[in-house]
Image (tube, helix red, strand yellow):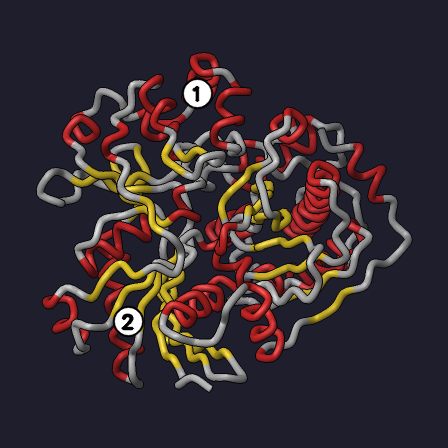
Amino acid sequence: MTAPVRVAAVDLGATSGRVMSGRISGERVEINEMHRFPNGAVRVRGSLFWDVLGIHREVLRGIGEVARTGPLHGIGIDSWAIDHGLLDRDGQLLGQVFSHRDARVDGIADKVVAEVGAATLYGTTGIQQLPFNTLYQLVAARGTAALEAAETMLLLPDLLGYWLTGALGAERTNASTTQLYDVRTGTWAVDLCRELGLPWGILPPLREPGSLLGPLLPDVARELGVSADVPVVAVGSHDTASAVVGVPAEVRDFAYISSGTWSLVGLELDRPVLTEDARLADFTNEIGVDGTVRFLKNVMGLWVLSESLRSWSERRYKDVELRSLIEAASEFEPLRTVVDINDPRLLFPSTASDPMPERIAALAAEAGEVVPHSPVAITRCIVDSLAVAYRRHVRTAAALAGTSPEVVHVVGGGSQNEVLCQLTADACGLPVLAGPVEAAALGNVLVQGRALGADLPDLPAMRDLVRRSYDVRRFEPRDGLDWAAAESRVP
């Protein structure tokens, strides 16, 4: 039996970040939240940016909390994908880090597709056509002073890791989300960059999940009060890659939904699916830990509900609370209103002049659905629409990949929403296993643990440890609602 490993797992989401202490012994993996902080884009002169220096400060604070409460053997960072910083030749950050929800990418994807061709783009990168992919952000930046001066592009976890260690690189699971990565060769898509006039030399060396970035910089180690020998480990730095590691799957053929601000709905495969049918279905092929492929669809997720809640709290419904809303929605008429939860109009933050609930109502009116007006009716519309989307994408993924999943694992914050989990089981016609909530942090800890000597040779061993450490809730599918008819109402 190897000695216990204790690490700091930094897990960053678009609305909050957290730093967890993780401990792996022979029998259990345990995580404890040491520091949580709010996160969100900041609007400056009409553009949306991330407060990356503030995030860095909070990350240091959280790692320090872990270090003060016990031995620290390693540090790993995961976050959302796509967003990045540009460094100059001195290694300094050039300007602010844009949020993927910034409007500068409007219309860029269509221009790139017209220039390169949709089939060529998909055949190279295997990535879903999301309007804010890193590729489109860089195309939107062509001609700007920042891009012209850039020496290196670093995705957010790699940027934070660079500030801790001074090491430059791009962890593969996150790099594969950018639409700048050739999923066939496992290298950067240099020819694509050349064709689009992008400076491909800014793309840093690729590194594998589980590799060591290096020890802490001396000044960072002093600030944290730890040895400079503590390594930073490149985990599956895309949070979904880490979350899929943390899925407590017992069977090979399973579907997963990493449910949070976004919902990532898909399968774990051995190789990408680059067929024309997969392209037309707009599925994405992202690299997972241990050379797996995350074949999935991005769904707008609980962002729509959280933005609706924020809108209501700022208006006349100041006493609206999530738990009571969900409970009331569970008793509301099912499938009364369903909308396309992935409509691009739901992508951007709710504002006083364009609140999220009114967007939902407008989508329903356009589709000829019963228009929801009250918070309960809109909440029921959102959870029903999410369940319909999950049904469609689980079934489509299985058909495209030629598999038959036996179960759907729901992990992340959405696994706590029992109403949505039950509706997902009903809609998909499959059992749903819900939990763990902190799957991304667990996957982060497990990959670190293996890199630091824990006896976890492969993904089945990691998942077995999760099953032995955490309970999950099972939801059996129920009959009674016509989900196929509901799905047919959504374009």
Horizontal relation, residue 224 to residue 360: left or right: left
Q: Amino acid at mark 2?
A: Ile
Location of the C terminus (image quadrant): top right
Q: Residue at x 39, y 42 (%)?
A: 175
Task: Give the residue at mark 2.
Answer: 63
Residue 457 horizontal/vertical position (percent): 50, 68
Question: Which of pointers 1 and 2 indicates the residue nearer the eye?
Answer: 2
The answer for how far apart the CA atoms under marks 1 and 2 are is 40 Å
Query: Mark 1 highlights which residue?
Result: 107
Q: Position of residue 420 (x, y in %)?
A: 69, 57
Where in the figure is residue 159, as x and y percent of width and height? 26, 50
Amino acid type indicated by mark 1: Gly
Picture coordinates of residue 102 (x, y %)?
37, 34
Residue 224: assigned label: none
Residue at the spot x=71%, y=48% of the render?
Answer: 387
Mark 1 residue element: loop
Q: Does residue 411 show up?
A: yes
Q: Give the residue drawn at x 36%, y 23%.
A: 191
